[in-house]
Image (cartoon, rainbow, N blue to C red):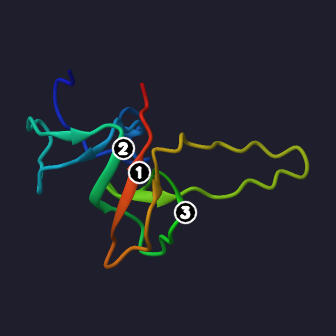
Amino acid sequence: KALYVVKADTGTATDTFAVGFALDAAAAAGDNIQVTIAGVHKDANVDGSTAAGTRLVVGSTAGRASIAVDINEGGSATVAQRPIIAVAVEADTANVATVIVIKQF
């Protein structure tokens, strides 16, 4: 059981881990809500360039999943990759799409 809600984003070190997608609309930090932690989630808040099959990670916009970039590390670069939290089932419409949530714990 989680203690409270925080919208995940990469801008705050303590907010970079997502356990799922909120089922309740307009959740504020500290609210108790229902969350999809695994399986199909309709109406997920996703990046506007999401296509079917896109791998999604925590992004820089609070509460919105971003597209996981492909890593082509051809040398000595250090690449930080966030855990995949979901895979899009369909392309987004106005930043909303159905996704398959990957359980994180």
Residue 93 place in picture, x, y as percent: 34, 78
What is the C-alpha distance between the residues marked 3 and 2? 15 Å
Crowding at label 2, few (<14), some or many (≥20) Cα neighbours within 10 Å?
few
Disc marking residue 33? none
- The residue beneath circle 1 is 100
Pointer 3 residue: 53
Say which element carries label 3: loop
Residue 4, how many percent across, how many down? 16, 30
Q: Give the position of the N terminus as an image quadrant.
A: top left
Q: Which residue is mark 2?
A: 39
Residue 71 versus residue 13: which sits nearer the camera? 71
Instruction: Spot the residue most to the right.
Output: 75
Q: Is residue 37 left or right of residue 50?
A: left
Check if mark 2's residue and mark 1's residue have beta carbons within 8 Å: yes
The crowding category of the residue bearing disc 1, from other C-alpha atoms within 10 Å (few below 14, some 14 to 19, many at least 20), is many
Amino acid under disc 1: Ile
The structure residue drawn at horizontal position 91% and vertical position 48%, both measured from the top left corner, is 75
Question: Quarter of the image holding residue 44?
Answer: bottom left
Residue in the image at 38% along x and 48% along y:
9
Q: Quadrant of the C terminus?
A: top left
Task: Residue at 34% x, 72% y: name it.
Answer: 95
Label 3 near label 1: C-beta < 8 Å? no
Question: Where does the image place residue 43, in percent across and percent down from the top left?
Answer: 26, 63
Label 3 with label 2: CB-CB less than 8 Å: no
User: Mark 1 or mark 3, which has the lower sequence index?
Assistant: 3
Image quarter of residue 83 = top right
Horizontal and vertical percent position of residue 33: 11, 39
Earlier sequence position, callout 3 versus callout 2: 2
The kind of residue tagged 3 is Gly
Q: Secondary structure at mark 1?
A: strand
Q: 101 or 82: which is nearer to us?
A: 101
